[in-house]
Amino acid sequence: MTVANESTVSTAATPPAHVPLTDPIELPCGQLIPNRLAKTALSECLGDPAGAPGERIVKLYEQWSHPGGCGLMITGNVMIDRRHFGEPGNIAVEDDRDIALLQRWVAAGKAGGNKLWMQLNHPGRQASTVCSCTAHTVT
Ligand SMILES: Cc1cc2nc3c(=O)[nH]c(=O)nc-3n(C[C@H](O)[C@H](O)[C@H](O)COP(=O)(O)O)c2cc1C
């Protein structure tokens, strides 16, 4: 029989005092994150003018995701409509034209069992007039 002690039992109200950052964590949604390091959403702006990802975003996620790196990486805003970009350099996913590079980006982020969550975005009235097809006016 296994007897739990204070260091192994936790509730939301009383988390254990010391949890190594290298310990995995299971989120309430069921996702198992291999360690306690997470990278928040950060608009990388490493896409080309057409919104394609490239070598630079693959290399960046390879570095963040190396063994012992971030267990969870939330991407920067990824546009769902190429006509409306939030910022120059945004990556867009609208169809499968960039599937090979997208797969390499995902593979880089998921190396070693890490999780990569893509933040999908439509900037709405915050779309940049510099890099979007349509000028936006507020009436
Ligand atoms: C340069 C930069 C880019 C960011 N890009 C995004 C983004 O694409 N999506 C998002 O939800 N938040 C974005 N954020 C917000 C961060 O994810 C984070 O919520 C914010 O920096 C507050 O966290 P902090 O208090 O640890 O700095 C960005 C922040 C910075 C500084």
Image (cartoon, helix red, strand yellow):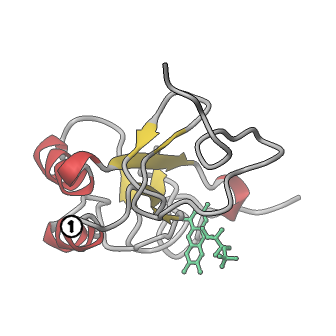
Quick one: 127 or 79, which is closer to the camera?
79
Q: Which residue lies furthest to the top in this view?
A: 1
Q: Which residue lies furthest to the right in this view?
A: 139
Q: What residue type is labelled 1?
A: His
Question: Looking at the image, is 134 positioned above or below residue 100?
Answer: below
Residue with the mark numbered 1: 66
Quick one: 110 or 100, which is closer to the camera?
110
Question: How far from the left and from the top, in percent, is residue 83?
Answer: 46, 52
Quick one: 101 or 21, which is closer to the camera?
21
Q: Residue furthest front?
A: 1
Quick one: 12 or 117, which is closer to the camera?
12
**Which quarter of the figure has residue 123?**
bottom right
Left/right placement of residue 129 relative to residue 68 reads right
Left/right placement of residue 121 relative to residue 46 reads right
> How busy is the neighbourhood of tag 1: few (under 14 within 10 Å), some, or many (20 plus)?
some
Question: Looking at the image, is 27 positioned above or below residue 2?
Answer: below
Question: How far from the left and from the top, in percent, is residue 79?
Answer: 46, 52
Q: Residue at 13% of width from left, 69% of height from top?
A: 55
Question: Looking at the image, is 90 positioned above or below residue 110?
Answer: below
Q: How many labels does the image show?
A: 1
Question: How far from the left and from the top, in percent, is residue 138?
Answer: 83, 61
Left/right placement of residue 85 relative to residue 56 reads right
Q: Residue at 75% of width from left, 38% of height from top?
A: 11
Q: Residue at 50% of width from left, 70% of height from top?
A: 42
Q: Residue at 52% of width from left, 55% of height from top?
A: 84
In what quadrant of the picture does the C terminus appear? Answer: bottom right
Secondary-structure class at tag 1: loop
Q: Quadrant of ligand 1?
A: bottom right
